[in-house]
Each structure stands twice: as structure tokens, then as C-alpha cells.
Image (tube, helix red, strand yellow):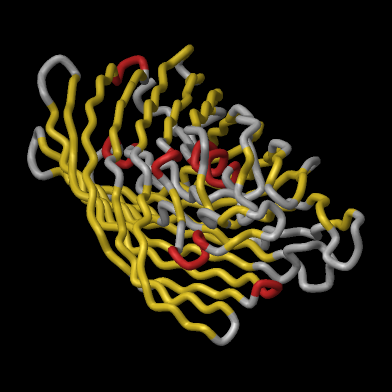
Amino acid sequence: MKDIMLTAVAVMLAAGAAQAGGVERSSQSVGILFEQGRYAEISAGGVAPDVSGTGLDSMTTGIAGTGDVTPGFGAAGLGYKQPLGDRVDLAIILDEPIGAKSHYPDDSTYLLRGVTGQITSAAVTTLLRYKMANNFSVYGGLRAVRTSGRTEVPLAGYTMKTSTETDYGYVLGGAWEKPEIGARIALTYNSKITHRFDATERFGAATISDGFSMTVPESVNLEFQTGLSPRTLLLGSVRWVHWTQFEIAPPAYAAAINPLTSQPFGPLVSYASNTTTLNLGLGRKFNDVWSGAVMLGYEKTSGDLVPDLGPTDGFKSIALAASYQASETIRISGGVTYVDIGDAKALAGRFSGNSAWAAGLRIGVTF
């Protein structure tokens, strides 16, 4: 069982694509720590969401369609792992922990037509793993995250752009393995990381220079696998994210009065509930060079009011993946994911019947 060729790309795609309308772009897996010997990988993928709804018409007292508010996006990652002796391993991971890209089409009469929002980030995580007796190990390290954002609300004459900030957090975890049956369970804690942005806000001709804080939320990952037979593996993950820590609230915008409610606008983005994301699947080795996996994903719909810049609420997904052992040292994995995005209620609209497709490719080299 120890030589079964697993393809973790199914988990990666299910986690990434399912957040197509939200802000999470990485599941923060530590799976690379458990690769054999010296190992490097590169991964790339694309997501094509289709998120639309209906809401208040800006030209009449009726209802208008929003159009598709979530353009497609791509993501890439790098990873490197190296033993530092019989008991210590080093891993370096580059990824995009959070990100967002939304645009309400300009040719709609929907109240928020022309509204755009974007978050970009990049992270470097350095991990050390120490292998103890009885198949247990502990690991931890530091994560640096660089983030910036901007938004535009044309009908209000409002724009906002942040500075680019780099801040730091940490990772702690432990694992147990039984290689002869392909069993492993790993529990990982990712700390929150708080950015303090300088911001430039504009309402019409008025320019306001101020600042605000935003927290990349803490999370807990449980990743597991076990052999069911010499060629079949059960694998899955549970991910909890403390999304109530996440808020984007530029001061001038948050204090301005919303004509729909006669109350302050409040945050551009915030969440009233935390999330628990489940993935469960099977991996199968077909022969010496080919293996595959199927993965089901689920995140409960909260029913909360969601941000207009991220109008999704929960999901169900299915991912199919295949892995090809091109040589003794090169493994190529790829997969596709379909996501049924949960219906959502935003302040100005209702969103239903939405979905996303994703595809990804990963090349791993052992040397």
C-alpha cells in the first residue's frame, strides 16, 4: 500500500473552486511534508464560476438581473520538500491564501451595476517536521502573507485602494502514520494574520487618506487517508475557518449612510458565521503508471446575509482526478471539479442556481 500513487489534486480543486465567489483560494494543505525524499512540485489551475441573481433595478422600482458577477480566475503554486536528516524534513510552500475578483456588469440596470472588488495575496510558508518514535511526528513554521485590495462603486462615486502589506503568522501541527496500510492523519492549526492597511478613499471629488485593519482568519485542517485494499485508498479532509474574524471596513465607506436602509453602510465585506468544509473520496491504483480519485465536497449553507462582493453561501462539489507516473521521478496529476454553489441572500439581491467549473494540473518531481 505504501507505493500507491495518490493524487491530492482532487482535494485541492474541490477546496479552491468551491470558494469561487468568496475569498478563500487555498486549503493550506501540508501534504507535501509527507512526500518521499527530496521533492518539488508546481501546480496551476483555473476556475470558471457562473454567479448571477436578481435585485433592485436602478432605473425603475422593479427587479433587474445582475448578470454574471464573478469573472474567471487562475491560481498557481510551488512547493519544495527536503530531508535534513533521518528525523527532520523541511518544506517551503508558495500559494495564494485569499483572493477575490467580482464585477457587476456595466450593461445591467441592476442597482450595483459597475461595482468591482479585488483582493490579491501571496504567501510563503516554511515548515519543519520532526519524526518521533511510534510513527508520530510534529511540525510547525512561519507564514508570510502579502495582500492588497481595491473596490469601486460607480453609482456612489466611490473608490478605495489599499497599500500592499506583508505580515506574519505561524503553523503548528502533528501527524500519525502507518505506511504499510497507507494510513495517515494530520491535524494542522494556521494562525490568523492581521494586516494594517493605509487606504485612499474617494467619494466624488473628496479624497480621504485613512487606514483600517483586516485579518486573514485562523483555521484548523484535519487531513486523513487509509488503505481499504492494496490498490484502494479512502481519503478526506475537514477544514474549519474562523470567518467571523474577516472584515473589510474602510472608515469613510463604513460611516456613510446607505439610502436603502438609512443606516451606515458598515463593512464592505464581513461574515456572520464560520465555515466547516468536508471532503471525502476514494483513490484507486489501476496499474503501475495510472491512478485516479473521486472526491465529494460539502459546505453547509448558513442562511446569513452575505456580502454583495461575494454572493455565495455554501456548496456541494464533485472532483475527478488522475495521476500518471511518467518516470521513476516524475508524476503528473490533473483533475476537474464541478461545484453547485449554494443560494445566497445579499443586501441588494438574491442569488440562486449558480455553479462553477475548475481544472488543475500538478507536476511533481522526486530527486
Question: Can you tell which quarter of the image residue 256 is in?
Answer: bottom right
Image coordinates of residue 106 in percent, x first then y, are: 77, 73
Image coordinates of residue 31 in percent, x first then y, are: 34, 37
At x 35%, y 18%, the residue is 183
Q: Nearer the viewer, residue 6 or 47?
A: 47
Residue 296 visible to an observer of this rendering = no
Image coordinates of residue 39 in percent, x first then y, are: 29, 48
At x 77%, y 52%, the residue is 52
Rendered position, 143 above or below 149:
above
Image coordinates of residue 311 in percent, x first then y, are: 66, 48
Q: Nearer the viewer, residue 158 or 124?
A: 158
Q: Quadrant of the N terminus?
A: top left
Tell which residue pokes out farthest to the bottom in this image: 205
98 relative to 116 in the view: left or right:
left
259 relative to 214 in the view: left or right:
right
At x 18%, y 44%, the residue is 141
At x 36%, y 36%, the residue is 219
